[in-house]
Amino acid sequence: MTNIAEPIYRVFHSQIGSYYHGLQQSQWLSEAELQELQVRKLEKLLAHAAVQVPYYAEKNFPSDPDGTIRILGRLPLLQRADLQAGGEALIARNLSRREMYTQVSGGTTGEPVRFFMGNAQRVISRAYEKRSDYEWTGNLPWSTRKAMLWGQPVRQKKSSVLQTISEWTQRRKKFHLYQASPTEMARQARRLAAYRPGLIMGYSSILGDMAECILQHGIVVRPAAVLATAEMLWEDTKAVIEQAFQCRVYNRYACREFGVIASECPAGNLHINAERFIVEIVKDGQPAAKGDVGDIIVTDLDNFAFPFIRYKLGDIGALSPEPCSCGRKLPVLAKVTGRSGDYIIAPDRTRSMVTILTRVFMNLPKHTVRQTQLVQTRRDHLEIHIIPDEGYTPEFEAHIRQGILNTLRTSAIGLSFHYCDSIAPAPSGKRRFFVSKL
Ligand SMILES: [Zn+2]
């Protein structure tokens, strides 16, 4: 695959290019070579965490007579609650804040959490995208135009000049579909057609909405591939997307904490990015046999700023016992059956991802609110359940109300506040930040 434009665009991203070059080689390593690579990186990560990260320094990692991978299985799981309770203690002492950036993970399965990533991870993540989003879908990694159908509100707006330059050099453009009404969706669909992307990526549900809009208005958009990410891809949604864009839909398993964990290869299997992640499946506290469904536990071998060692994501899945016919020995994730996105649906049917509301609660002062749960009972009504902490005063109610209404940009939804001592978990045991009763 060559194209005259490829080297031109590559010039802007030499760091990503050299990392990607390594990944092009390592995807063909044997199982033993991949494991050796993981062990080497894990040893480095554990040694770093034990000394530089207060949370792990306290844990006194066991010594290593049986090999590092087995040690890993004996370390305690890291959970969202640990991030909430002791987030600061997970930050590496030997790195300055300028060497990392903040991320916030949404609250569809609990309270929102804040964490950090080392600056190098921006480059690393983009290199993995070159391999899976472009190479594996048969697209040129540097010159293909990628359209990203975004479901989150715009946070920081770059100046339009910077925006244009960055969109041009990166060959990608974001289409903001946050709360898009049917008219706005149709307008964005026409913009999308004019952009003529080779690749379209988006949350599964948003791709589904866009696909329906395109079919309804007879708009023609013909990418070479569509990537569905961040949410479960249901079969009927997939069928609509394929019909609208007349191309294959690739699945992709990604989350805030880690970026892309696994991607679909040309042979149709979801390969784990094993050079970066150790993915374990744990059932009743024990490693599950291949093919058995259990909790997905992820260790990020590249995040030294805020090490995620055996992090329980809250998703359920299984590892495939079958090797993939494409020849890559990167382990295959057989299925992810976990959560799908949650939405607040307004009376005019506009949908807002509930994760955007987590910021309202994240920004409250410490010791204000111990727990919250939002329950949508009707299209025009949202219940806010709060377990107040010692610092909570009646003024916060007005503050939270304003924050929610500003974020949802509507006055058509009424809010009622309910104060309680406890919030019951869902049948799965998860405390949910949002429950929809629509
Ligand atoms: Zn494969």
Image (tube, rainbow, N blue to C red):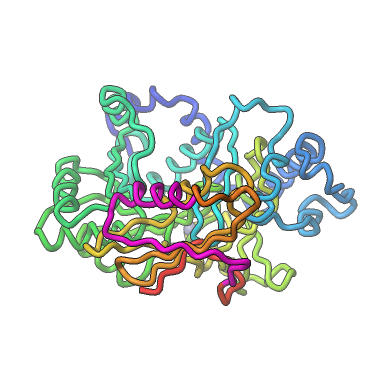
Quadrant of the rendering where the N terminus is positioned: top left
> Does the rendering let one see residue 306?
yes
Q: Residue at the location (39% across, 48% down)?
A: 402
In the rendered structure, does residue 399 fall within the stretch colored magenta? Answer: yes
Q: Nearer the viewer, residue 384 or 116?
A: 384
In the rendered image of this protein, does residue 156 appear above or below residue 39?
above
Quadrant of the rendering where the C terminus is positioned: bottom left
In the rendered image, residue 35, in percent from the top left (x then y), is placed at 69, 51
Q: Quadrant of residue 247?
A: bottom left
Question: Residue lying furthest bottom in this view?
Answer: 427
Q: Quadrant of residue 191?
A: top left
Q: Residue at the location (74% across, 69% down)?
A: 285
Question: Residue lying furthest front in this view?
Answer: 394
> Does the rendering let one see residue 242?
no
In the rendered image, residue 149, in percent from the top left (x then y), is placed at 30, 48
Q: Nearer the viewer, residue 163 or 377?
A: 377
In the rendered image, residue 88, in percent from the top left (x then y), is placed at 69, 39
In the rendered structure, does residue 293 fall within the stretch colored magenta? Answer: no
Query: What's the magenta region?
Result: 396-425
211 relative position to 19: left or right: left
In the rendered image, residue 49, in percent from the top left (x then y), is placed at 76, 40
Q: How many marks?
A: 0
